[in-house]
Amino acid sequence: MKKTRKKRSVWSAGSQGAQVRARIERACSGNQPTLWAFAEWLAKPRGLGPGSITVRLHSACSFVDAVTARAGASCARAFQSLTSDGIERFFVQYGTNHGMAARRSMRSGMRLFLEFAACRGWVGWELADAVPSLRSYRLSGLPRGLSDEHLSMLLGSPWEAGECLGRDRAIMVLLATYGVRRGQVSALQLADIDWRERTVDFAAHKGGKAIQHVLTDSVAESLADYLRNERPASDCDYVFLRARPPHLRLGPAAISMMVISRMKRLGLPPRGPHVFRHAFATRLLRAGQPVKAIADLLGHRSLAAVAVYAKVDHARLFEVAVDWPEAVS
């Protein structure tokens, strides 16, 4: 009998609060009171949710530490002497070592902190506009999936002994088999696995649709191994829990850290769990699956969300290609 599914709770504000606290505590001690005030400003006047506060604060901490270190002064004095050239110089330097997603996040975090600083009278309101804009074009890039060789390495290479070996291996198999998002793996509940009917359900994510997949043998074996031999005894309904007490739900960020860590150990370029999603979609497309079926399996409501994968379907692109016209003499 399948368990009655309890109402899902969002990734808790308490857990996000712990991440905020940990990040602020890693910042320069002199900047920590200001960063706490910034976090409160994001929550109340700006009305941001816990997840958004965590992301924006992470970027702002790096920005504030860099500005105060360069000025050799307190936060207030450092920002009072900050110029638009200084803002651009920091952002350009940051961008040389980070990808587009990280640059966008830093841009938003910088602008929000400069608005906060303007509220305190440290800078003029116009200084937030000095943060460089990032121009991007829809579908301009290619999805960055995993090659078959790298996927085989991640799944088939021996794992180092550790306290979370079974859990991490089960998560990796889920990501690779179904192409689900890290948040969907984090939100997976015991009631979502129907062992008798051999199905597994994933909650809707980012405005998409809920997904049901067939419970494959490899997924079933890895999940059963974790649930029987490693999962802590807990009343929590989520499948994947933290190894150390209190045994709370394992968060999306922890899943990313696990994936990146394993890639580094195997000598692969460190990338997040989303590469499994790209690899899953590309694999289906090359197998001849229609775009509508791929969108359904990924939980997308719109076909436009998977249009970018058509750019890696070389076989079909050759079918629609036309000969380059010869020069007319």
Image (spheres, grey):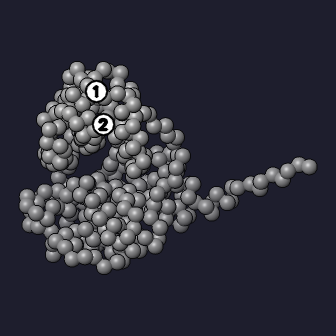
Where, quadrant-wise, is the N terminus in this rendering? bottom left
Report crowding for label 2: few under 14, some 14 to 19, many 20 or more residues within 10 A (C-alpha).
Answer: many
Outermost residue, front side: 72
Please give the label number shown on residue 214: none
Q: Rounded to the nearest whole Å, what is the CA distance between mark 2 and mark 1?
A: 19 Å
Q: Quadrant of residue 51?
A: top left
Name the spot of residue 203 as percent of width and height, x first. 29, 52
Residue corresponding to mark 1: 81
Q: Amino acid at mark 2?
A: Gly
Name the spot of residue 133 as percent of width and height, x first. 44, 34
Please give the label number shown on residue 109: 2
Q: Residue at x 14, y 65 (%)?
A: 243
Report crowding for label 1: few under 14, some 14 to 19, many 20 or more residues within 10 A (C-alpha).
Answer: few
Where 46 sits versus 301, above or below?
A: above
Where 196 sits versus 22, above or below?
A: below
Of 137 and 77, nearer the camera is 77
Q: Residue at x 34, y 25 (%)?
A: 127
Q: Residue at x 21, y 28 (%)?
A: 77
Name the spot of residue 152 as percent of width and height, x first. 41, 74
Of 268 and 300, nearer the camera is 268
Q: Is residue 64 visible?
A: no
**In terms of secondary structure, where does tag 1 sit?**
loop
Q: Residue at x 17, y 56 (%)?
A: 249
Q: In the rendered structure, are the residues bearing label 2 and label 1 in contact, judged by CB atoms less than 8 Å apart?
A: no
Q: Does residue 150 appear to the left or right of 82 in the view shown? A: right
Q: Quadrant of residue 90?
A: top left
Q: Earlier in the sequence, mark 2 or mark 1?
A: 1
Q: Amino acid at mark 1?
A: Ser
**In terms of secondary structure, where does tag 2 sit?**
helix
Q: Is residue 232 visible?
A: yes
Name the spot of residue 270 as percent of width and height, x first. 36, 62
Outermost residue, bottom side: 158
